[in-house]
Image (cartoon, rainbow, N blue to C red):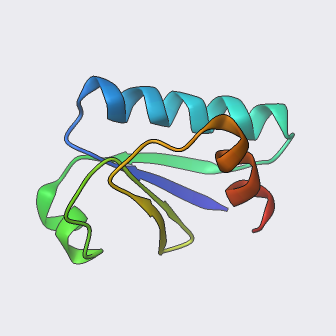
Amino acid sequence: MKVEVLGSGCKKCNTLAELVAERAQALQLEIELEKVSDMATILEYGVMSTPAIVINGEVKVSGGAPTAAEIDALLQSH
């Protein structure tokens, strides 16, 4: 599963990427995690507010950081 965390590289975006990695490991899920900070790429997804989470090319969360439980649900649904 490919998971992208979109953001400018701010503390909130970096923290979200770390949390996604931690939750995937806790759930024993193999993911390919990529942090995307290129604004052109972010806009291609139609994301206007970061941080955002994209799973397998589909925007799942935009404009805020979900809780650990919400991340678990997102990861387990794929």
Residue 33 image offset from top left, x and y in percent: 54, 46
Q: Position of residue 70 (x, y in %)?
A: 66, 49
Count of numbered circles on the image = 0
The residue at 48%/36% (across/down) is 17
Percent from the top left, x then y, of residue 37? 23, 47
Q: Is residue 17 above or below residue 78?
A: above
Quadrant of residue 44 within the rendered picture: bottom left
- Looking at this view, name the residue that lies furthest to the right: 28
Residue extending farthest to the left is 40
Horizontally, is 71 left or right of 60 in the view?
Answer: right
Which quadrant would the N terminus be assigned to in this image?
bottom right
> Eyeballing the image, is 62 above or below 65?
below
The residue at the point 80 percent across, 58 percent down is: 76
Q: Quadrant of residue 13?
A: top left
Direction from residue 56 to residue 73 in the image, left or right: right
Q: Dividing the image into 4 quarters, which one contains the C terminus?
A: bottom right
